[in-house]
Structure formats: C-alpha cells, structure tokens
Amino acid sequence: MSMSMSGILGGSKLGVEPILKARDMADKNVEHLGVMAYTANFQWLKPRKSPGDRMAVSCDLHTTTVNRPAHFRLEMSREVDPREVTAEVVGPPGTTDCRLSLAGNKGTFTPTHVGMHQLIVYNEGEKVAGSPINIRVTPELSKISFPGMDPCAIGSIVEVLVS
C-alpha cells in the first residue's frame, strides 16, 4: 500500500487528483474501472523537465580570497519549489555554509580556507544545470609577507628566491 501512496503523491505533484484511496487501489476486490479512470488522466499530461533542468546556476568568478563573500546567481522556472532548492560548498576542510536568497535568485558563501572549492546546487535532490562550479580560494594578499629588498637600487639586478 505504501507504493500506491507514493504513486498517488507523485500524481498529485503532476496535477492528477486521486479518485480512489491507496487502500482501494491495492484491494483486488475493487472494481478496476475506477483505477483505469484514474490512470487515464495521466495520458494528457505534458512532459515536464527533470528537476535539475528546471533551473541553472552561474557564477562570474572562478577565484576569490579567504573571508571574502562569493556570490552566484540562480535562474529558475516557475515550476521550481523554493523549499526544494539546496546548495553546498565543498572545500578542503569539508562543507562550508552557503546562504540562498531565493526571492532575489542569488546565493552567497564565504570561504574560510585556501584551496579548491566546489559549489553544488540541487533542486529536489538533483544537481542543476551549471553545477558544480569550481572556485579557487587564495589567501588574503595582506597576509603574504616577504623579507624585503633593502639594499636594492632602481635598475640594479636583484636575485629573488621564492620558496
């Protein structure tokens, strides 16, 4: 009976309202014309795109720095239920918090570690078009230090060692 209930819930999502209860559909003594009348409603449904094809994600940046918010855009069709949209950012330390603003069709995350991060957006558990997006996170430039070049004069040849 749980399979019948799953089928009825799926049909309701498609816009086909049940005329029988799940218990009645599973009962072998119930007249089959009712079940056939219910299933006949499915033949006039228009094909729907898969959940992953109903929306897309895009991001203009491919590199960012640590502790600087990174923004991305979401393009959704009207069929998308905002409660079914999730996003995650997987980086070197694991998963990073990601905030979605579905009213503005955008999202933000702030990386806290250096390295490659992957932004993955899901609709109904399925990856959306354009996902995953790889983003390289670099250290803050103010945190990079070097010993200096004190005895250096303009135009002179200086050896610089990068380790």
Image: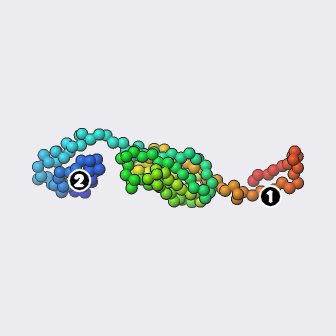
Residue 60 in sight: yes
Residue 9 place in picture, x, y as percent:
27, 53
The residue located at (42%, 53%) in the rendering is 85
* Residue type pointed to by label 1: Pro
Quick check: 39 left or right of 94?
left
Q: Nearer the viewer, residue 6 or 108?
A: 108
The residue located at (50%, 53%) in the rendering is 107
Residue 77 place in picture, x, y as percent:
39, 45
Query: Crowding near pointer 2: few (<14 within 10 Å), some, many (20+)?
Result: some
Which residue lies under the disc numbered 1? 147
Secondary structure type for disc 1 = loop
Q: Of the numbered discs in the image, which one, if any, rests on residue 134?
A: none
Which residue lies under the disc numbered 2? 4
Precedes in sequence: disc 1 or disc 2:
2
Quick check: 6 left or right of 146?
left
The residue located at (39%, 55%) in the rendering is 83
Q: Quadrant of the N terminus?
A: bottom left
User: Mark 1 or 2, which is nearer the eye?
Assistant: 1
Secondary structure type for disc 2 = helix
Q: CA distance from mark 1 to mark 2?
A: 72 Å
The residue located at (48%, 46%) in the rendering is 57
